[in-house]
Image: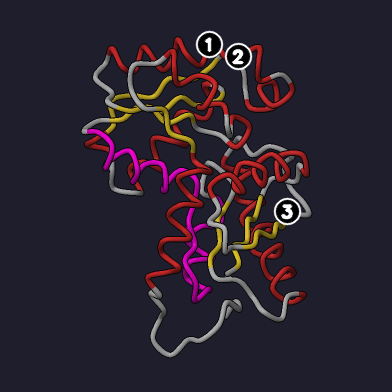
């Protein structure tokens, strides 16, 4: 079976980081392929970035599927703002899973209330809107934002580990029973930090890959559709 990971950011290094994390959660009988946005922001951080990147995300998937006769069995949108998720889900006849949605739904199964640690204060309203759109605001204990934005964290993630731990523990003090480290640029950091936070730390890529592959095995096809091609 085949999983397509699409990164709507234009940063190839983020695609490679996400792919490395995806392979850690990918079942042995699955193959992974990737696609990266050809235009837009290197790291999506604003509503304008999202609007442009949604177009880039759709085009990246179209181009990939046009070159792959066998298509794919599931798609993971490798952007924590779930950019392009709803458009791709409408158009494709395979499961399409976003990083934030997957981690939110996993958090609801892990504990009663959850918290988000996000990159940069200006992203907080965007994530609040997304949590509401996913219908999960009632379970949100809070959102903590690092002072640094995603590009700075991507450049030197080890320099922000203490800040991530402090933010996560503030959410625990506010009642969070699990904490989501939000952002493609922090993919995989949960493994290094888990021992210093009292509740489970969730990673969007691990959650999304696990859910996408599970949904594909459920064979939830749309009526009258028979391929992974865009309509």
Q: Between tags 3 and 1, which lies in front?
A: 1
Ranked by sequence position, the earlier of labels 3 and 2 is 3
Q: Using the numbered discs, state the Cα–Cα distance from disc 3 to disc 1 in whole angstroms.
A: 30 Å
Instruction: Reply yes or no: does residue 87 show up in magenta.
Output: yes
Image coords of residue 228 (percent x, y): 57, 77
Vertical position of residue 177 compared to residue 231: above or below? above
Q: Quadrant of residue 216?
A: bottom left
Image coords of residue 123 (percent x, y): 52, 30
Q: Which residue is mark 1?
A: 163
Q: Which residue is mark 2?
A: 160
Image coords of residue 139 (percent x, y): 24, 35
Image coords of residue 96 (percent x, y): 49, 62
Q: Using the numbered discs, state the Cα–Cα distance from disc 2 to disc 1 in whole angstroms.
A: 5 Å
Vertical position of residue 179 compared to residue 15: above or below? above
Q: Which residue is mark 3?
A: 37
Question: What residue sits 55% from the left and 53% below the top?
Answer: 26
Query: Circles 2 and 1: CB distance less than 8 Å?
Result: yes
Label 2 sits on a secondary structure element that is helix
Query: For this rendering, which residue is in front, 100 or 84?
Result: 100
Quadrant holding the C terminus: bottom right
């Amino acid at each position: 079976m085949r999983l397509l990971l699409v990164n709507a950011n234009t940063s190839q290094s983020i695609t490679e980081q996400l792919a490395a994390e995806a392979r850690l959660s990918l079942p042995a009988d699955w193959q992974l392929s990737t696609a990266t946005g050809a235009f837009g922001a290197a790291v999506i951080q604003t509503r304008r970035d999202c609007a442009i990147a949604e177009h880039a995300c759709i085009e990246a998937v179209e181009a990939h599927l046009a070159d792959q006769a066998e298509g794919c069995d599931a798609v993971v949108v490798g952007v924590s703002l779930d950019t392009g998720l709803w458009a791709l889900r409408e158009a494709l006849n395979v499961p399409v899973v976003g990083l934030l949605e997957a981690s939110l739904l996993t958090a609801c199964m892990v504990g009663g209330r959850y918290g988000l640690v996000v990159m940069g204060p200006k992203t907080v309203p965007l994530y609040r809107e997304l949590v509401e759109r996913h219908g999960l605001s009632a379970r949100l204990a809070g959102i903590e934002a690092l002072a640094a934005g995603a590009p700075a964290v991507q450049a030197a993630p080890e320099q922000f580990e203490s800040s991530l731990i402090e933010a996560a523990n503030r959410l625990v003090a506010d009642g969070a029973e699990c904490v989501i480290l939000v952002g493609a640029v922090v993919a995989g950091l949960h493994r290094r930090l888990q021992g210093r936070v009292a509740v489970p730390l969730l990673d969007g890529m691990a959650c999304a890959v696990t859910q996408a592959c599970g949904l594909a095995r459920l064979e939830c096809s749309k009526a009258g559709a028979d391929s992974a091609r865009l309509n």
